[in-house]
Image: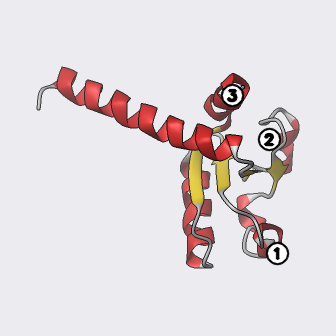
Amino acid sequence: MNDSMFGLFKDKLADTENDRLADEIKNGAFLVDVRTPQEFSDGSVKNAVNIPLNELETSLHNFKGKGAIVVFCQSGNRSGSAKRILEKHGFQQVFNGGGWRSLNKLVNSIK
């Protein structure tokens, strides 16, 4: 596969993931910023709660009874770890929303 074909495939995959995230958010997904409180206070996604990654396992009660859960951070690394932790504890509808700025654009584009 040449670079332009790979780029096209990668863009289509990202579009599909964004569509799925948008659907989950429209349906009331629980938005969780896993950055530090300081990072959270500098800006986050509307209606998100801050549960830092290092407090996730002691805060599992906050996730009980939630449908879809979208975790996000600065770049997507910590939220990837958060997704794995939540899935390890039995939560099934967990989505890595990636970086908060791109997720914020997505949230703000939803009508």
Point 76% across, 74% down: residue: 60
Q: Are the residues flagged by discs 2 and 3 in contact, CB closer than 8 Å?
A: no
Q: Quadrant of residue 40?
A: top right
Q: Could you say where residue 109 lies in the image, as x and y percent from the top left? A: 67, 23
The residue beneath circle 1 is 61
The mark lying in front, picked from 3 and 1, is: 3
Task: Identify the mark nearer the N-term, 2 or 1.
Answer: 2
Q: Quadrant of residue 26?
A: top right
Point 82% across, 52% down: residue: 50
Point 77% across, 36% down: residue: 45
Residue lying farthest to the bottom in this orientation: 89
Mark 2 vs mark 3, CA separation in Å: 24 Å
Q: Nearer the viewer, residue 102 or 110?
A: 110
The mark lying in front, picked from 2 and 1, is: 1
Left/right of residue 14 with respect to residue 5 in the rendered view: right
The residue beneath circle 2 is 39
The C terminus lies in quadrant:
top right
Amino acid on which the number 3 mark rests in the picture = Ile
Task: Identify the mark nearer the N-term, 3 or 1.
Answer: 1
The residue beneath circle 3 is 110
